[in-house]
């Protein structure tokens, strides 16, 4: 563990300085650049279990978990062993493999809405594909999304998006044609009346509603009682499809995702992160009658050279096997609850206005005195204070998501000692903010 007296990031600064001459902003994904928290990012060297080591040799307790996939802990020995065996057979086939069938069966068995599934390479690709499928099935062009929900960087989704767009303070992205976004309707999360109004104003024109059933890209925001149920009813009444983007929540807040947790079955679901066990992966699936439109079974085209890659399938299979072991989700909930409650209590005891919560292995904390039920609520947070808090925690050996507008993640590798160290670090940092 590092401390403020031994925290040295000279090599990270050197590597990042070089990266800025090679890649836009020095990164391959915007939030990694630490723009919203100040300072410069640490450069990772290796990960194991619940920990990170940077190129300067500093060790951190990690609550990002490669943005969600590392639910069993980084580099889990059983996942690594399975990958070693798979590597001997080759890294890519570009053809059918047995592992696709195995993982597909596991996903279909676990996720209530999925009767058929198509594997892709990222959450963005899954959401982009499901968007096309929604339109193909309904013959309609418009969709409803929610402010602060992020569904990847496809043109139609970059309207009032959360995650990196919110982090960087950017408006709707340049390069996105207005003719494309004209078909994207937005509503505040947790606001059923706004959704009703959109359906009334766009009769027989809306293909479907897509949302994060638990928001993770505007910070951690759970659905209010009746919200998901209301969306299910509204879409059915209006001949539209309901899509749960479970790239974050899938296999994380319950083995069957948010739809199992809340007992609401959408028509289509997107997945990613956990089902790849740390390797690039995405998937979309749903009712058989809808999925049968996807080529080559049907006319809606979507393809990918690395889709169903044997390494990603192997890592996903082993990860889901690990998650099926008795007591897994009870442990994830217990450790995350202890962490979240501890952080909130320490902050309140020291006079800070905070709001937050958790579901299973997903959590969040906002620096605001307001209850957070939507992206507008989240924007009342003191982001400057969060930036100072983030840097302080980094200096005390705790790695948090470098944005107020990102959820945190725990894993089976996190221990009670890790939680106690984290709460102690927060107390030290918050005492001086």
Image: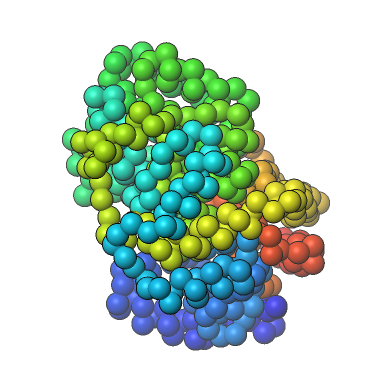
**Residue at image coords 30%, 77%:** 22
Q: Nearer the viewer, residue 188 or 265?
A: 265
Q: Does residue 424 appear in this view?
A: no
In the shown orientation, is residue 420 left or right of residue 402? right
Q: Nearer the viewer, residue 421 or 391?
A: 421
Q: Residue 376: x and y, percent?
A: 50, 36
| Residue visible at 42% across and 57% down in the picture | 98
Where's the N terminus, which quadrant?
bottom right
Quadrant of res 389: bottom right
Could you tell whether 112 is left or right of 63 in the image? left
Residue 321 sits in which quadrant? bottom right
Residue 430 % position (x, y): 72, 60
Q: Please state which of residues 410 and 181 is positioned toward the viewer in this rendering.
A: 410
Q: Whole-percent x and y of residue 60? A: 64, 73
- The vertical placement of 425 against 69, above or below, is below
Q: Quadrant of the C terminus?
A: bottom right
Q: Is residue 380 above or below residue 418?
A: above
Residue 106: give x, y in percent of width and height.
52, 47
Q: Identify the residue at the far front of this view.
A: 98
**Residue 203 appears in the rendering:** yes
């Amino acid at each position: 563990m590092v401390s403020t007296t031994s925290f040295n990031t000279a090599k990270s600064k050197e590597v990042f300085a070089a990266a800025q001459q090679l890649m836009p902003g020095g990164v391959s994904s915007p939030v990694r650049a630490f723009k919203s928290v100040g300072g410069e990012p640490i450069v990772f060297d290796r990960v194991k279990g619940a920990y990170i080591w940077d190129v300067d040799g500093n060790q951190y307790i990690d609550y990002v978990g490669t943005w969600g996939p590392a639910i069993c802990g980084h580099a889990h020995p059983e996942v690594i062993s399975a990958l070693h065996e798979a590597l001997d057979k080759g890294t890519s086939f570009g053809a059918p493999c047995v592992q696709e069938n195995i993982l597909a069966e596991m996903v279909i068995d676990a996720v209530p809405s999925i009767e058929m599934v198509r594997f892709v390479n990222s959450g963005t690709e899954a959401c982009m594909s499901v968007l096309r499928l929604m339109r193909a099935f309904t013959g309609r062009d418009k969709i409803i999304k929610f402010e602060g929900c992020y569904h990847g960087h496809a043109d139609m989704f970059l309207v009032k998006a959360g995650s990196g767009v919110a982090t960087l303070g950017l408006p709707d992205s340049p390069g996105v044609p207005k003719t494309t976004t004209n078909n994207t309707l937005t509503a505040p999360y947790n606001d059923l009346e706004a959704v009703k109004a959109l359906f009334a104003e766009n009769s027989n024109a809306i293909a479907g509603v897509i949302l994060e059933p638990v928001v993770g890209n505007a910070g951690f925001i759970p659905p209010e009682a009746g919200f998901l149920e209301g969306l299910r009813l509204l879409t059915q009444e209006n001949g539209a499809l309901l899509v749960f983007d479970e790239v974050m929540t899938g296999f994380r807040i319950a083995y069957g995702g948010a739809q199992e947790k809340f007992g609401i079955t959408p028509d289509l679901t997107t997945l990613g992160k956990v089902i790849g066990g740390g390797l690039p992966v995405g998937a979309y699936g749903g009712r058989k009658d809808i999925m049968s439109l996807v080529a080559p079974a049907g006319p809606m085209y979507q393809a990918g050279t690395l889709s169903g890659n044997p390494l990603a399938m192997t890592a996903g299979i082993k990860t889901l096997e690990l998650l099926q072991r008795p007591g897994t989700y009870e442990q994830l909930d217990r450790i995350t609850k202890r962490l979240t409650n501890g952080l909130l209590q320490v902050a309140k005891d020291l006079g800070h206005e905070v709001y937050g919560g958790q579901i299973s292995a997903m959590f969040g904390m906002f620096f605001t005195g307001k209850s957070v039920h939507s992206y507008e609520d989240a924007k009342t947070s003191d982001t400057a204070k969060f930036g100072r808090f983030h840097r302080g925690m980094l200096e005390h050996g705790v790695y948090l998501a470098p944005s107020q507008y990102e959820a945190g993640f725990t894993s089976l590798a996190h221990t009670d000692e890790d939680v106690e160290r984290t709460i102690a670090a927060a107390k030290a940092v918050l005492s001086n903010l």
